[in-house]
Image (cartoon, rainbow, N blue to C red):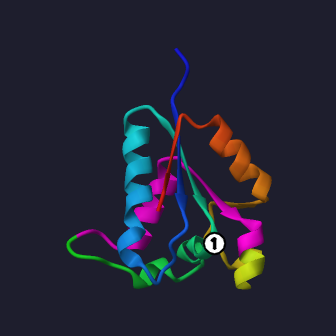
Amino acid sequence: MTEKNLLYVQTSGVDKPERLYSPLVLAQTATAMRIKAAVYFLGMGVTVVKKGEANKIKMGSFPGLKEVLDQTLRAGIKMYVCEASTQLIGIDRSDFIEGVEVVGAATLNDLVLDADGTMWF
């Protein structure tokens, strides 16, 4: 049986905190279901993994976004940052949290083609 594969694409940035938790929680849930998951940060979504930004976000009774990001990384879920988006927004590669990989735009195309499903936030 072929392993299932889901891709979650985060295009919303820290200015839309209500949209930031879903891809991380869903990726963790997929992993618990033995489904391979990855999160790709694109456009303003790259601000989510800029050092210090997740520390500022906590919604309702949910844990803070930093804790959810850390849980996602500990679960072994790959997190990718679009290099073109970093250039567009003006964030240096060294400004991202440890554990994310800055990649080219072709990587997103490859991830989408390899995925059994994609969800965009």
| Viewer-closest of 86 and 70 | 86
For this view, does 95 lie left or right of residue 120? right
Q: Residue at x 46, y 55 (%)?
A: 72
Is residue 30 shown above or below 62? Answer: above
Q: Dot 1: few (<14), some (14–19), or many (≥20) neighbours within 10 Å?
A: some
| Viewer-closest of 40 and 93 | 40
What residue sits right under mark 1 in the picture? 43
> Measured from the top left, where is residue 52 in percent x and y?
53, 83
Query: What is the total number of numbered labels drawn onto the structure image?
Result: 1
> Measured from the top left, where is residue 96 in percent x and y?
65, 74
Q: Residue at x 59, y 76 (%)?
A: 44
Specify the amino acid type for callout 1.
Answer: Gly
> Measured from the top left, where is residue 38 in percent x and y?
56, 48
Q: Is residue 66 visible?
A: yes
Q: Residue at x 28, y 76 (%)?
A: 59
Does 83 appear in magenta? yes
Judging from the image, what secondary structure is the residue with disc 1 in? helix
Q: Residue at x 72, y 48 (%)?
A: 109
For this view, does 85 lie left or right of residue 44? right
Does 74 appear in magenta? yes
Can you tell which quarter of the image residue 43 is in?
Answer: bottom right
| Viewer-closest of 93 and 45 | 45
> Measured from the top left, where is residue 73 in percent x and y?
52, 55
Q: Specify start and end residues of the magenta stretch as a single range.
A: 62-85
